[in-house]
Each structure stands twice: as C-alpha cells, then as structure tokens.
Image: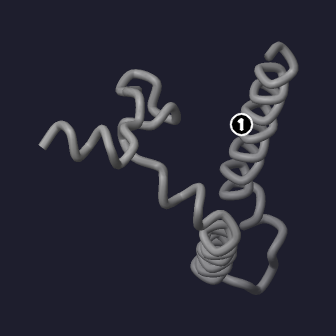
Amino acid sequence: MQTAVTQLYATGIMAALAAAFVWSLNFVVPFVIGHYTVFGFALVRFVVSGAIGAITLTFQHDAMRDLTLHSPAFPGRARPRLDQQERADRR
C-alpha cells in the first residue's frame, strides 16, 4: 500500500510540474515564436490538448465509463459502488 501511495504522490507532482510548465509557455512563447501569432500558438496548443484527451478516452474507455462523482477520484463524495443485485434490491 505504501508504494501505491508513493506512486500516486509522484504522479501528482509530475502532473503539477507539467501544468506549471504548460502555463508558463503563455508568457515565454510570444518572445520565441517570431512571425507566428499568439492566436496560432493557442490554437495549436488546444488542438494538441484535445488530441491527447481523445487518445486518453480511447485507450482508457473502461476506466472512464466507471468514473462518477461518487468514485474515489472525488474523495469528499466517495461512496461504495453497488453491484447490480444491490441496485435491484433497493428498487
């Protein structure tokens, strides 16, 4: 269990660093891109982000389908999942 938590922390730290790097590109790129416009850079950035999101949804479809507001990804709202029999019993 300790290694799983450590891996989650490492993943979170890497995601935070990547987000900070991408955010900082807004301020650095206009000085570097030369004759391209900031609009063109933003367009490319959003297209790349959308492509990464589409690829993630394609390969992680099963995991994404089970993600709800009551899943452990949202700790303040976590509830145990009910299987089909328990759902039928509650009706």
Q: Residue at x 35, y 26 (%)?
A: 77
Q: Residue 23, position in %: x, y?
A: 66, 50
Q: Residue furthest top?
A: 2
Q: Residue 55, position in %: x, y?
A: 69, 74
Q: Looking at this view, is 42 or 79 the one in front? A: 79
74 relative position to 26: left or right: left
Report the quarter where the C terminus lies: top left
Q: Residue 11, position in %: x, y?
A: 79, 36
Q: Residue 65, position in %: x, y?
A: 48, 60
Q: Residue at x 78, y 38 (%)?
A: 17
Number of numbered discs overlaid on the protein picture:
1
Q: Is residue 19 above or below residue 70?
A: below
Q: Residue at x 48, y 53 (%)?
A: 66
Report the quarter where the N terminus lies: top right
- Label 1 amino acid? Ala
41 relative position to 79: left or right: right
Q: Residue at x 20, y 39 (%)?
A: 89
Q: Residues within 10 Å of mark 1 (few under 14, many from 20)?
A: few
Q: Is residue 50 above or below residue 64?
A: below
Label 1, secondary structure: give it.
helix
Q: Which residue is mark 1?
A: 16
Whether residue 86 is visible here, answered yes or no, is: yes
Which of the 4 image quarters holds residue 74? top left
